[in-house]
């Protein structure tokens, strides 16, 4: 029933609006506010490249499938546009009217070229001659010069010049280089001028002998969603490389323009780029605000979040710096270990696990999945080192990880060159699970160790994403992971796992069974209780099961950072369901699933959200956490999230979100701050 769901795309926009709020919130440190503006814009770029592109393709191909909430593609595009335009206006008003003046008060000046004094203009003339003029290419548009190709997310200047000899006007395009800083620093180190303005005020150098009449910045976004026919591809790597080449020429799905651009130039660009008026977004301010992220590099700790240094988990610490490092395998043998990043150090746990495995002569085999990793990844380095040390190493590299395809192709080739067995998984399924398996010879027999995580093996994102990881040598879990790797690298038909819930085989059914068990308890007059923490909740079938649980008397708390299509708090449907979203310093990324189970409480963590793609079209792993001490850790995390009154937003039945505020006399309870303090207290 359409009235039982929020629209997925509009729910995502509300998530991005909460991100924007962090930039509007005066409690956020000043340079961090710039960061959130940049995140809002980069999120929006990806939204258009993927989600809006898909809807536009549906419209263009006549696929008129209704969304679960009953909207056609045309209705979705219209509502997306109507909701986004005021948010974009709010972004630029915040930057121009609030943040730029506040930065100036702090001695950081983002300045328009027009307000510069002559010595500063001379400095930028020299910069233009030295750094810009050699790399700029003015491209004329006339019968002899066809309209140029414009790359995705590139910033351009539409220029109108006049030939003084003939009086004839001409149109040209100048690309603003994306290889140079978005904001050009002056020599004083505290003043910055937008790069496009520096170019615009020196256009006469590019159009010698012409009169520059006017210029207007614009920026386009292209469809960047890959369409790979895996069943027909003999070589998946080659097929993806070919699709990546095609991505550069995807159809244009959005054009951002300066508000001052005349209608004639706007119309010409729309005609050349095959855009309708609804796909044009006027901007009263700077385009490409993602460049604001560079201001986080300024040495102004007083304008940033206090620094946070992840701590080494207590069981992995030595008594003193002179002691021999603790053997991570012996620690795991003593009992399961749970790590929570970025509070617990990724380097001192996950990276160390792989480094020790690579160099331990007793380790025979390492197997690992790789979805996204960083450019200087020690994780990949450990796999290569292990192969060079003569160990058998297998890596499942997901080539289809969106916008990381090229990086993953490079890593796959590098791993293969080092002698690692590289596989790309199963046709039609993304390998999204986070698994590492180490086989070690101990006392004449083999023992297996595994790490099962909620986040990527990426040292960079591990510093800013909240994620969980379980280290264990539990024989049943290790056997499940071994069989899953066999399925992924070979021709296994394994369909059942003893402890793991694995998508697309058993995860959906397993989660539904756990929810229905709570329903039976509630219907028998006992307590029914569910807490789920995920990034997104959009799957209609899972939403219906949660509605049924609410109607059966189960109390349900959902911590959903991003999209949520479930409507909470509706009498007769979902009055026992509460939904919050936590937005703040770190990106909430961990997934936790809790079921009261008649007092025999069960906790799970894993890589999957309650989205159709995670449940049906990806390989995902959710593992039980059975150690009582580790369960208490997960319970504490959930309680801290649920009692947050600083970063938590409550979802209302009408789809609006309201940020919780401390009541008079109530202490501020920030999830991220409390978890940092909790980790620090264990030092």
Image: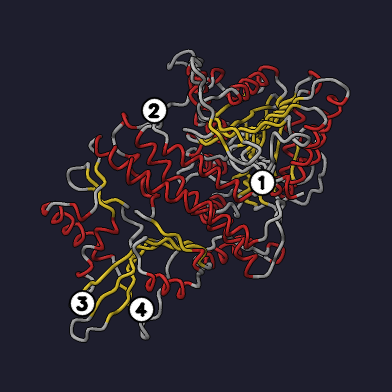
**Residue 335 placement (x, y as % from top left):** 67, 20
Q: Distance between the Cα atoms at labels 1 and 2?
A: 38 Å
Label 2 or label 4, whichever lies nearer to me, is 4
Q: Distance between the Cα atoms at labels 1 and 4?
A: 45 Å
At a point 48% along the width and 44% down the height, the residue shown is 374
Label 2: few (<14), some (14–19) or many (≥20) C-alpha neighbours in 10 Å: few
Answer whether residue 413 is visible to the viewer in this image: no
Q: Distance between the Cα atoms at labels 2 and 4?
A: 51 Å
Q: Distance between the Cα atoms at labels 1 and 3?
A: 55 Å
At a point 45% along the width and 63% down the height, the residue shown is 255
**Residue 629 placement (x, y as % from top left):** 66, 17
Tell which circle, 2 or 4, labels the residue nearer the N-terminal end: 4
Coloration of the structure image = secondary structure
**Residue 622 placement (x, y as % from top left):** 71, 36
Furthest-right residue in this view: 524
Label 2 or label 3, whichever lies nearer to me, is 3
Q: Distance between the Cα atoms at labels 4 and 3?
A: 15 Å
Residue tagged by mark 3? 210
Residue tagged by mark 2? 307
Q: Is residue 26 left or right of residue 350?
A: left
Answer whether residue 611 is visible to the viewer in this image: yes
Residue tagged by mark 1? 6
Residue tagged by mark 4? 141
Tell which circle, 4 or 3, labels the residue nearer the N-terminal end: 4
Tell which circle, 1 or 2, labels the residue nearer the N-terminal end: 1
Q: Helix, strand, or loop for circle 3?
A: loop
Residue 602, placed above or below residue 266: above
- Labels 1 & 3 near each other (Cβ < 8 A): no
Label 4: few (<14), some (14–19) or many (≥20) C-alpha neighbours in 10 Å: some
Q: Is residue 86 left or right of residue 142?
A: right
């Amino acid at each position: 029933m359409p009235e039982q769901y929020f629209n997925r795309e509009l729910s995502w926009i509300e998530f991005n609006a909460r991100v924007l709020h962090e930039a509007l919130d005066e409690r956020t440190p000043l340079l961090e506010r710039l960061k959130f503006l940049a995140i809002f814009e980069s999120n929006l770029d990806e939204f258009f490249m993927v989600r809006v592109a898909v809807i536009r393709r549906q419209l263009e191909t006549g696929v008129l499938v209704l969304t679960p909430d009953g909207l056609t593609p045309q209705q979705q595009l219209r509502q997306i546009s109507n909701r986004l335009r005021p948010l974009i206006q709010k972004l630029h008003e915040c930057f121009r009217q609030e943040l730029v003046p506040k930065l100036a008060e702090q001695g950081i000046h983002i300045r328009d070229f027009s307000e510069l004094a002559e010595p500063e203009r001379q400095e930028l003339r020299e910069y233009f001659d030295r750094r810009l003029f050699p790399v700029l290419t003015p491209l004329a548009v006339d019968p002899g010069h066809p309209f140029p190709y414009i790359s995705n997310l590139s910033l351009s200047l539409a220029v109108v010049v006049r030939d003084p000899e003939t009086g004839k006007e001409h149109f040209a395009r100048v690309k603003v280089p994306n290889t140079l800083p978005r904001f050009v620093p002056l020599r004083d180190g505290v003043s910055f001028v937008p790069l496009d303005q520096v170019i615009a005020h020196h256009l006469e150098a590019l159009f010698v002998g012409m009169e520059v009449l006017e210029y207007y910045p614009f920026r386009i976004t292209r469809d960047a969603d890959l369409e790979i026919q895996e069943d027909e591809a003999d070589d998946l790597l080659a097929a993806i490389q070919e699709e990546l080449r095609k991505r550069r020429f995807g159809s244009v799905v959005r054009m951002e323009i300066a508000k001052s651009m005349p209608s004639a130039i706007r119309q010409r660009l729309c005609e050349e780029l095959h855009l309708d008026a609804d796909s044009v977004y006027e901007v009263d301010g700077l385009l490409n605000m993602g460049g604001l992220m560079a201001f986080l590099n300024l040495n102004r700790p007083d304008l940033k979040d206090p620094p946070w240094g992840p701590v080494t988990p207590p069981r992995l610490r030595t008594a003193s710096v002179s002691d021999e490092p603790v053997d991570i395998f012996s620690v795991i043998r003593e009992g399961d270990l749970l790590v929570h990043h970025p509070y617990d150090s990724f380097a001192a746990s996950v990276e160390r696990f792989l480094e020790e495995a690579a160099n331990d002569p007793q380790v025979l085999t390492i197997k690992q999945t790789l979805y996204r990793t960083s450019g200087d990844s020690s994780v990949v380095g450990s796999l290569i080192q292990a192969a060079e040390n003569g160990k058998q190493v297998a890596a499942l590299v997901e080539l289809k990880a969106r916008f990381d395809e090229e990086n993953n192709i490079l890593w796959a080739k590098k791993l293969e060159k080092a002698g690692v067995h590289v596989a790309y998984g199963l046709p039609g399924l993304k390998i999204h699970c986070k698994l590492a398996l180490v086989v070690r010879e101990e006392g004449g027999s083999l023992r297996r160790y595994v790490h099962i995580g909620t986040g990527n093996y990426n040292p960079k994102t591990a510093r800013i994403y909240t994620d969980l990881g379980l280290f264990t040598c539990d024989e049943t879990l290790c056997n499940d992971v071994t069989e899953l790797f066999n399925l992924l690298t070979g021709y296994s038909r394994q369909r059942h796992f003893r402890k793991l819930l694995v998508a697309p085989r058993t995860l959906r059914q397993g989660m539904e069974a756990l929810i229905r068990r709570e329903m039976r308890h509630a219907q028998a007059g006992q307590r029914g209780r569910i807490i789920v923490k995920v990034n997104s909740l959009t799957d209609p079938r899972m939403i219906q099961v949660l509605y049924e649980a609410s109607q059966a008397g189960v109390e349900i708390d959902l911590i959903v950072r991003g999209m949520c299509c479930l409507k909470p708090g509706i009498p007769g449907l979902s009055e026992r369901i509460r939904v919050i979203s936590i937005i703040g310093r770190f990106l909430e990324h961990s997934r936790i699933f809790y079921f009261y189970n008649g007092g025999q409480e069960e906790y799970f963590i894993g890589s999957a959200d309650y989205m159709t793609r995670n449940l049906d079209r990806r390989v995902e792993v959710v593992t039980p956490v059975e150690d009582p001490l580790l369960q208490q850790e997960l319970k504490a995390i959930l309680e801290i999230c649920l009692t947050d009154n600083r970063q938590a937003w409550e979802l209302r039945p009408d789809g609006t979100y309201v940020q919780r505020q401390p009541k008079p006399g109530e202490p501020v309870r920030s999830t991220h701050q409390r978890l940092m303090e909790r980790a620090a207290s264990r030092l």
